[in-house]
Amino acid sequence: MKTLAALTATGLAAVLVWTAANAAQTGVPASAGPADPALIEDLVAANRILYREGIVDGFGHVTVRHDRDPNRFLMARSLAPDLVTADDLIEYDLEANPIDLDGRSQYSERFIHAEIYKARPDVVSVVHNHSPNVVPFGVSGEPLRPVYHMAAFIGDGIPVFDLRERFGDTDMLVSDADRGRALAEVLGDAPAVLIRGHGVAVVGPNLPYSVGRSIYLEMNARIQAQAMALGAPVNYISPGESQAVLGRGENRGYERPWEMWKREAMGP
Ligand code: MN
Protein backbone atom coordinates (compact mmCIF):
# COMPACT_ATOMS: atom_id res chain seq x y z
CA MET A 1 0.00 0.00 0.00
CA LYS A 2 1.37 3.39 -0.98
CA THR A 3 1.99 6.02 1.65
CA LEU A 4 0.28 9.39 1.42
CA ALA A 5 3.64 11.02 0.64
CA ALA A 6 4.24 8.60 -2.25
CA LEU A 7 0.74 9.25 -3.59
CA THR A 8 1.32 13.01 -3.36
CA ALA A 9 4.67 12.68 -5.13
CA THR A 10 3.03 10.61 -7.89
CA GLY A 11 0.30 13.22 -8.22
CA LEU A 12 2.82 16.05 -8.36
CA ALA A 13 4.86 14.25 -11.02
CA ALA A 14 1.70 13.73 -13.06
CA VAL A 15 0.84 17.43 -12.80
CA LEU A 16 4.37 18.42 -13.88
CA VAL A 17 4.23 16.07 -16.88
CA TRP A 18 0.79 17.39 -17.80
CA THR A 19 1.95 21.03 -17.41
CA ALA A 20 5.02 20.45 -19.59
CA ALA A 21 2.95 18.69 -22.25
CA ASN A 22 0.35 21.42 -22.14
CA ALA A 23 3.03 24.11 -22.49
CA ALA A 24 4.56 22.32 -25.48
CA GLN A 25 1.17 22.07 -27.17
CA THR A 26 0.04 25.64 -26.65
CA GLY A 27 3.39 27.43 -26.90
CA VAL A 28 2.74 29.04 -23.51
CA PRO A 29 5.88 28.86 -21.39
CA ALA A 30 5.73 27.07 -18.04
CA SER A 31 5.55 29.12 -14.88
CA ALA A 32 8.75 30.11 -13.11
CA GLY A 33 7.04 28.79 -9.99
CA PRO A 34 5.63 30.57 -6.97
CA ALA A 35 7.24 33.93 -6.18
CA ASP A 36 8.64 34.78 -2.74
CA PRO A 37 5.63 35.52 -0.49
CA ALA A 38 7.45 38.62 0.85
CA LEU A 39 7.77 39.94 -2.71
CA ILE A 40 4.07 39.32 -3.36
CA GLU A 41 3.20 41.10 -0.13
CA ASP A 42 5.33 44.10 -1.14
CA LEU A 43 3.78 44.25 -4.62
CA VAL A 44 0.28 44.28 -3.14
CA ALA A 45 1.43 46.96 -0.68
CA ALA A 46 2.99 48.99 -3.51
CA ASN A 47 -0.35 49.09 -5.35
CA ARG A 48 -2.14 50.40 -2.26
CA ILE A 49 0.64 52.84 -1.28
CA LEU A 50 0.60 54.45 -4.71
CA TYR A 51 -3.15 55.01 -4.37
CA ARG A 52 -2.86 56.45 -0.84
CA GLU A 53 -0.08 58.82 -1.91
CA GLY A 54 -2.15 60.15 -4.82
CA ILE A 55 0.17 58.74 -7.49
CA VAL A 56 -2.44 56.43 -9.06
CA ASP A 57 -6.24 56.60 -8.90
CA GLY A 58 -8.34 53.94 -10.59
CA PHE A 59 -5.64 53.79 -13.29
CA GLY A 60 -1.90 53.17 -13.29
CA HIS A 61 0.09 50.07 -12.36
CA VAL A 62 3.20 48.75 -10.65
CA THR A 63 5.18 45.59 -11.43
CA VAL A 64 8.19 43.67 -10.14
CA ARG A 65 10.49 41.07 -11.69
CA HIS A 66 9.93 37.51 -10.53
CA ASP A 67 12.53 36.55 -7.91
CA ARG A 68 13.02 33.10 -9.53
CA ASP A 69 13.39 34.24 -13.14
CA PRO A 70 14.53 37.68 -14.41
CA ASN A 71 12.64 37.01 -17.67
CA ARG A 72 9.32 37.10 -15.84
CA PHE A 73 7.48 39.85 -14.01
CA LEU A 74 4.40 40.06 -11.83
CA MET A 75 1.49 42.42 -12.52
CA ALA A 76 -2.09 42.62 -11.32
CA ARG A 77 -5.02 41.81 -13.58
CA SER A 78 -6.82 44.91 -14.89
CA LEU A 79 -8.01 46.34 -11.59
CA ALA A 80 -7.90 49.61 -9.63
CA PRO A 81 -4.60 49.47 -7.72
CA ASP A 82 -6.16 49.97 -4.28
CA LEU A 83 -8.22 46.79 -4.78
CA VAL A 84 -5.28 44.52 -5.72
CA THR A 85 -4.72 41.37 -3.63
CA ALA A 86 -2.23 38.51 -4.02
CA ASP A 87 -4.86 36.50 -5.93
CA ASP A 88 -5.00 39.18 -8.64
CA LEU A 89 -1.33 38.87 -9.65
CA ILE A 90 -0.42 37.42 -13.05
CA GLU A 91 3.02 36.17 -14.16
CA TYR A 92 4.19 37.60 -17.51
CA ASP A 93 7.09 36.90 -19.83
CA LEU A 94 9.06 39.76 -21.40
CA GLU A 95 6.82 39.72 -24.50
CA ALA A 96 3.97 40.67 -22.12
CA ASN A 97 2.37 37.22 -22.56
CA PRO A 98 0.51 36.02 -19.46
CA ILE A 99 1.62 32.58 -18.25
CA ASP A 100 -1.75 31.70 -16.74
CA LEU A 101 -4.41 34.27 -17.55
CA ASP A 102 -7.29 32.07 -16.39
CA GLY A 103 -9.94 34.27 -18.02
CA ARG A 104 -8.86 37.45 -16.29
CA SER A 105 -8.63 40.82 -18.08
CA GLN A 106 -5.25 42.50 -18.54
CA TYR A 107 -3.86 46.05 -18.44
CA SER A 108 -3.45 47.20 -22.05
CA GLU A 109 -0.25 49.07 -21.16
CA ARG A 110 1.62 46.02 -19.83
CA PHE A 111 4.06 46.56 -22.74
CA ILE A 112 5.55 49.57 -20.90
CA HIS A 113 6.79 47.16 -18.25
CA ALA A 114 7.82 44.28 -20.52
CA GLU A 115 9.89 46.41 -22.87
CA ILE A 116 11.62 48.30 -20.04
CA TYR A 117 12.55 45.00 -18.33
CA LYS A 118 13.92 43.78 -21.67
CA ALA A 119 16.01 46.90 -22.23
CA ARG A 120 17.18 47.49 -18.65
CA PRO A 121 18.61 44.46 -16.81
CA ASP A 122 19.23 46.71 -13.76
CA VAL A 123 15.52 47.50 -13.40
CA VAL A 124 13.57 45.26 -10.99
CA SER A 125 10.41 47.33 -10.62
CA VAL A 126 8.40 49.69 -12.85
CA VAL A 127 5.57 52.09 -11.97
CA HIS A 128 3.34 53.67 -14.60
CA ASN A 129 1.16 56.55 -13.44
CA HIS A 130 -0.57 59.78 -14.49
CA SER A 131 0.27 61.81 -11.37
CA PRO A 132 -1.17 65.28 -12.05
CA ASN A 133 1.76 67.60 -11.29
CA VAL A 134 4.12 65.63 -13.52
CA VAL A 135 1.93 65.82 -16.64
CA PRO A 136 2.58 69.57 -17.38
CA PHE A 137 6.30 68.86 -17.82
CA GLY A 138 5.49 66.36 -20.56
CA VAL A 139 3.55 68.89 -22.64
CA SER A 140 5.18 72.27 -22.06
CA GLY A 141 8.77 71.78 -23.13
CA GLU A 142 9.78 72.94 -19.62
CA PRO A 143 12.20 70.30 -18.33
CA LEU A 144 11.52 68.55 -15.02
CA ARG A 145 14.59 69.31 -12.89
CA PRO A 146 15.48 68.65 -9.25
CA VAL A 147 14.47 71.49 -6.91
CA TYR A 148 15.36 69.68 -3.68
CA HIS A 149 17.54 66.91 -2.32
CA MET A 150 14.70 64.35 -2.04
CA ALA A 151 14.48 64.31 -5.84
CA ALA A 152 18.22 64.39 -6.58
CA PHE A 153 17.71 61.18 -8.60
CA ILE A 154 16.28 63.43 -11.35
CA GLY A 155 19.90 64.43 -12.01
CA ASP A 156 20.20 66.52 -15.16
CA GLY A 157 16.58 65.95 -16.18
CA ILE A 158 13.90 63.44 -17.16
CA PRO A 159 13.47 62.60 -20.88
CA VAL A 160 10.11 63.03 -22.63
CA PHE A 161 8.66 60.33 -24.89
CA ASP A 162 6.30 61.61 -27.59
CA LEU A 163 4.33 58.84 -29.36
CA ARG A 164 3.53 61.24 -32.20
CA GLU A 165 7.14 61.38 -33.40
CA ARG A 166 7.06 57.77 -34.55
CA PHE A 167 3.41 56.77 -34.59
CA GLY A 168 1.49 59.90 -35.65
CA ASP A 169 -1.93 60.52 -34.10
CA THR A 170 -2.55 57.72 -31.61
CA ASP A 171 -4.91 57.00 -28.70
CA MET A 172 -1.93 58.09 -26.49
CA LEU A 173 -1.58 54.62 -24.96
CA VAL A 174 1.63 52.56 -24.88
CA SER A 175 -0.37 49.45 -25.66
CA ASP A 176 1.82 47.33 -27.92
CA ALA A 177 5.42 46.10 -28.12
CA ASP A 178 6.52 48.67 -30.75
CA ARG A 179 5.34 51.57 -28.63
CA GLY A 180 6.83 50.04 -25.49
CA ARG A 181 10.19 49.56 -27.21
CA ALA A 182 10.20 53.18 -28.42
CA LEU A 183 9.43 54.31 -24.86
CA ALA A 184 12.26 52.21 -23.43
CA GLU A 185 14.67 53.73 -26.00
CA VAL A 186 13.84 57.26 -24.84
CA LEU A 187 14.09 56.18 -21.18
CA GLY A 188 17.70 55.14 -21.84
CA ASP A 189 19.47 54.83 -18.49
CA ALA A 190 17.29 57.48 -16.76
CA PRO A 191 15.21 56.78 -13.61
CA ALA A 192 11.98 57.84 -15.34
CA VAL A 193 10.52 58.89 -18.67
CA LEU A 194 7.66 61.34 -19.13
CA ILE A 195 5.01 60.35 -21.67
CA ARG A 196 3.68 63.43 -23.46
CA GLY A 197 -0.02 64.06 -22.86
CA HIS A 198 -0.30 61.00 -20.66
CA GLY A 199 1.95 60.44 -17.63
CA VAL A 200 5.23 58.83 -16.68
CA ALA A 201 7.06 55.51 -16.25
CA VAL A 202 9.37 55.30 -13.22
CA VAL A 203 11.92 52.53 -12.68
CA GLY A 204 14.01 51.26 -9.78
CA PRO A 205 16.22 48.43 -8.50
CA ASN A 206 13.35 47.28 -6.24
CA LEU A 207 9.77 48.17 -5.27
CA PRO A 208 10.61 50.79 -2.59
CA TYR A 209 12.71 52.69 -5.16
CA SER A 210 10.12 52.71 -7.96
CA VAL A 211 7.36 53.67 -5.52
CA GLY A 212 9.51 56.22 -3.62
CA ARG A 213 10.74 57.83 -6.84
CA SER A 214 7.15 58.07 -8.11
CA ILE A 215 6.13 59.89 -4.92
CA TYR A 216 9.09 62.31 -4.89
CA LEU A 217 8.88 62.93 -8.64
CA GLU A 218 5.30 64.11 -8.12
CA MET A 219 6.31 66.28 -5.14
CA ASN A 220 9.26 67.75 -7.05
CA ALA A 221 6.99 68.61 -10.00
CA ARG A 222 4.58 70.46 -7.71
CA ILE A 223 7.37 72.31 -5.90
CA GLN A 224 9.13 73.16 -9.17
CA ALA A 225 5.94 74.69 -10.58
CA GLN A 226 5.52 76.69 -7.34
CA ALA A 227 9.13 77.89 -7.49
CA MET A 228 8.77 78.89 -11.14
CA ALA A 229 5.53 80.76 -10.36
CA LEU A 230 7.45 83.04 -7.97
CA GLY A 231 8.89 84.60 -11.10
CA ALA A 232 12.61 84.76 -10.26
CA PRO A 233 15.09 82.36 -11.87
CA VAL A 234 15.06 79.01 -10.04
CA ASN A 235 18.30 77.80 -8.46
CA TYR A 236 18.03 74.09 -9.23
CA ILE A 237 20.12 71.36 -7.59
CA SER A 238 23.09 71.09 -9.93
CA PRO A 239 24.20 67.81 -11.52
CA GLY A 240 27.26 67.89 -9.23
CA GLU A 241 25.08 68.39 -6.16
CA SER A 242 22.76 65.60 -7.31
CA GLN A 243 25.74 63.28 -7.57
CA ALA A 244 26.91 64.29 -4.07
CA VAL A 245 23.44 63.66 -2.63
CA LEU A 246 23.17 60.27 -4.35
CA GLY A 247 26.68 59.39 -3.14
CA ARG A 248 25.19 59.21 0.36
CA GLY A 249 22.63 56.65 -0.86
CA GLU A 250 19.39 57.68 -2.55
CA ASN A 251 16.98 58.61 0.26
CA ARG A 252 18.50 55.86 2.45
CA GLY A 253 17.18 53.24 0.04
CA TYR A 254 13.63 54.38 0.90
CA GLU A 255 13.69 51.90 3.79
CA ARG A 256 12.42 54.33 6.41
CA PRO A 257 9.39 55.67 4.51
CA TRP A 258 8.68 52.24 2.98
CA GLU A 259 7.88 50.72 6.39
CA MET A 260 5.61 53.68 7.17
CA TRP A 261 3.84 53.62 3.80
CA LYS A 262 3.37 49.89 4.09
CA ARG A 263 1.88 50.11 7.57
CA GLU A 264 -0.53 52.84 6.46
CA ALA A 265 -1.58 50.81 3.43
CA MET A 266 -1.75 47.35 5.01
CA GLY A 267 -2.26 47.97 8.75
CA PRO A 268 0.20 46.92 11.52
MN1 MN B 1 -1.46 55.11 -18.76
Image: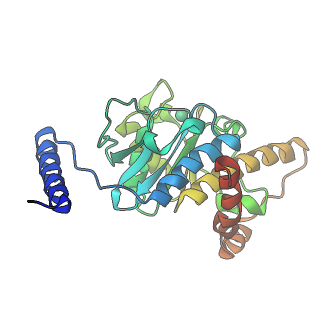
In this view, the residue farthest toward the left is 1
Q: Left or right: where does residue 118 sit relative to residue 12?
A: right
The front one of 120 and 77 is: 77
Q: Position of residue 191 (x, y in %)?
A: 57, 56
Quarter containing ligand 1?
top right
Q: Residue at x 66, y 59 (%)?
A: 258
Give the quadrant of residue 55.
top right
Q: Is residue 199 visible to us here?
A: no
Q: Position of residue 152 (x, y in %)?
A: 70, 62
Q: Quadrant of the N terminus?
A: bottom left
Quarter of the image with the C terminus in it: bottom right
Residue 268 seen in render: yes
Across the whole image, how many numbered discs are drawn on residues?
0
- Kindly identify the residue that appears in the image at 57 percent across and 44 percent down: 47
Q: Is residue 210 left or right of residue 9?
A: right
Q: Going by the image, does 151 lie left or right of 12? A: right
Tell me the residue at 35%/39% (across/down): 177
* Residue 182 placement: quadrant: top left
Residue 245, position in %: x, y?
A: 72, 71
* Residue 187 image offset from top left, x and y in percent: 50, 51
Residue in the foreground of this view, choosing between 113 and 79: 79
Q: Is residue 218 above or below residue 253?
A: above
Q: How is the image coloured?
A: rainbow
